Amino acid sequence: MQAKKKRRKTQKHSFILSVALLLVAGYFAISFISSLLEIREKEQEVDTVKAQYEAQLAENEKLQAVVDGGDEKDYIERIAREKLGYVMPDEKVYYDITPSN
């Protein structure tokens, strides 16, 4: 009779231990997957920032070429036309207002 009680206790302990180990393994698996997802998001952010950095370097090179080359008049005229909408006297500007569908 005592052998049966010991066997039941052992079975209860092994069942509880198995469930506890399963829960711990599940927790670590979920934590691992969560960490991997965060790493991928951060890598995408790094790629985005690198692309912005490269674009800024290209813009800086263009501006440095303007400063070094003395091509300021053309640069100023281009900025005035593109960003401010200025036109030369007696110049006619046509805008395409047709829908782009």
Image (cartoon, rainbow, N blue to C red):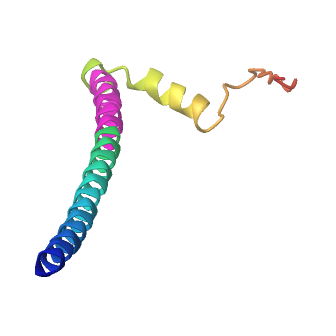
Residue ranking furthest to the front: 1
Give x and y (percent) for residue 48.
36, 37
Q: Residue visible at 34% across and 31% down?
A: 51
User: In front: 70, or 94?
Assistant: 94
The residue segment tinted magenta is 45-65
Along the viewing direction, whichever of 60 and 26 lies nearer the viewer: 26
Q: Position of residue 5 (x, y in %)?
A: 17, 80
User: How far across and how far down the image is residue 6, in percent?
Assistant: 12, 77
Q: Quadrant of residue 28?
A: bottom left
- Residue 30 counted in the magenta span: no
Q: What is the quadrant of residue 93 in the picture? A: top right
Position of the N terminus by quadrant: bottom left
Residue 62 among those drawn in magenta: yes
Image height of 20 relative to 5, above or below? above
Magenta segment, principal secondary structure?
helix
**Quarter of the rendering occupied by the C terminus:** top right
Query: How many numbered tags mark residues here?
Result: 0
Spot occupied by residue 8 in the image (x, y as percentages of width and height): 21, 74
Which residue appears at 32% of the width and 53% of the height? 34
* Left or right position of 22 against 76: left
Q: Nearer the viewer, residue 59 or 90?
A: 59
